[in-house]
Image (tube, rainbow, N blue to C red):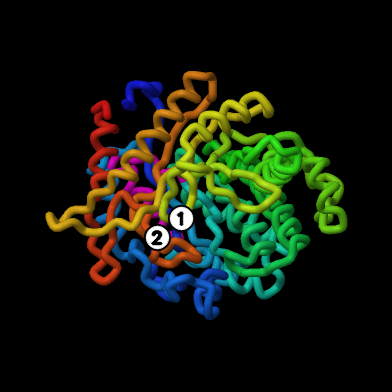
Amino acid sequence: MVSRSEFPPDFTFGVATASFQIEGAAREDGRGQSIWDTFCREPGRIRDGSDGDVACDHYHRWEEDLDLLRDLGVDAYRFSVAWPRIQPDGRGKVNGAGLDFYDRLVDGLLARGVQAHTTLYHWDLPQPLQNTGGWLDREVVGRFVDYALVVAGRLGDRLTTLSTLNEPWCASLLSYHLGAHAPGLRERRWGLRAAHHLLLAHGQALVALRSTGLRTPLGIVLNLSPAYPFSDDPADVARTAADDGYANRWFLDPLLRGEYPSDMCAIYGDDNPDVQDGDLRVIQAPLDFLGINYYTRTLSSAQGPQRPAGAEFTHMDWEVYPQGLTELLLRLRKDYALPPVYIMENGAAYPDERSPDGQFHDPQRVAYLQRHLAALAQATQGGADVRGYFVWSLLDNFEWAFGYSRRFGLFHVDYATLQRTPKDSARWYQSFLKGVQS
């Protein structure tokens, strides 16, 4: 059982989305192509062979979707800006129609009493920048800073928070090392170089944005997956430290300590990125907040992936492990000098199907949210300075390499008709936000 009263009165509750996953309108109003448009057209990259050309058609249905937010009763909405809508070539000329769309979106949120929490980069790099190296090219750092200044100059006065990057681990290591996301490259040294340039872009953007006098709180959003050893075997324990370094500390340490973890640098050897004088000071630019996306833990074994007996898994094959959120937040509080924290994404995919009564009953998702909110309340009561929580996601949407085969939404989307239908989880969240204990 968890209720809103277990959180501070000014605690922010919201929902989150991302531009490429919901907007569609891939070739309208001057939008350029992104690396994900390209990736979707490469055979075998997307599980169901789909793309983001239409997605949820949010670009045309944004007013309807904002009404869903208002009726849900959330305090806040987290969305991302599509860089190719603002600068189709990733540099130079600004596309006014793209800025106008987000201008209307922010004003529409405020008119409905909903805060705007905005992310500058949720992975849709303009393809022309990838053609010259993408995040492997240090020059892209300056291009990102230019883009950040354009967006903040237009929207910044009305935003509650502004995040530079969403999940740089995914945009670098998952994309340039493991090859699962756009641009689909597979070299560890490339992944590490991309990670360094993403972090450098973040730091330089913070410095540049603050130099303009912008007062909007600035931060970054990391996906963190706490690692636990599968057994007491020393090999499993050693693997746990390496997994934690790869997924978590490689980003936390430079941002919050101004250094890369020495144990991981020793492991990476010649694959370590080229860190120039002053880079780490820039990366460590003070954060007004740290965003954290939490979905599951990592269970580490020298023998490869393991499934603990009796564990529950989502449709993404991610273990449901709510206590990991409590333990992660308390560990971070102990290990780092943290700014205030927002849980910017938390949610679960399940194969939702319409019931004979015409509704979408998703008791597993309701239970997932209840248990994670209870874990979050426990962390705040233990001293973690968490200011907000956002459910992923408002809508079923394009789930990256899984296409439309995975559904995270509080609202079901019929991809043939684009009709939005509330699931039981939406009704539960609405009741929770009204203060009804559940």
Residue nearest the viewer, comparing 211 with 70? 70
**214 vs 137: above or below:** above
| x, y percent for residue 148 | 58, 53
What amino acid is at disc 1?
Met
Which comes sooner in the sequence, label 2 or label 1?
Answer: 1
Q: Secondary structure at mark 2?
A: loop
Is residue 193 placed above or below 247 in the rendered structure? below
Is 351 or 54 nearer to us in this picture?
A: 351
- Residue at label 2? 406
Q: Position of residue 400 (x, y in %)?
A: 48, 63
Residue occupied by mark 1: 316
Write down the region rendered in magenta: 99-117
Q: Is residue 8 visible?
A: yes
- Residue 109 in magenta? yes
Which picture quadrant has residue 54?
Answer: bottom left
> Residue 352 at x, y = what percent?
29, 56
Question: Do the residues bearing badges 2 and 1 touch, measured as CB atoms within 8 Å?
Answer: yes
The secondary structure making up most of the magenta span is helix
Q: How many marks?
A: 2
Is residue 31 found left or right of 67 in the rendered image?
right
Q: Residue at x 48, y 38 (%)?
A: 321
Q: In front here: 257 or 323? A: 323
**Residue at screen point 60% across, 67% down:** 90
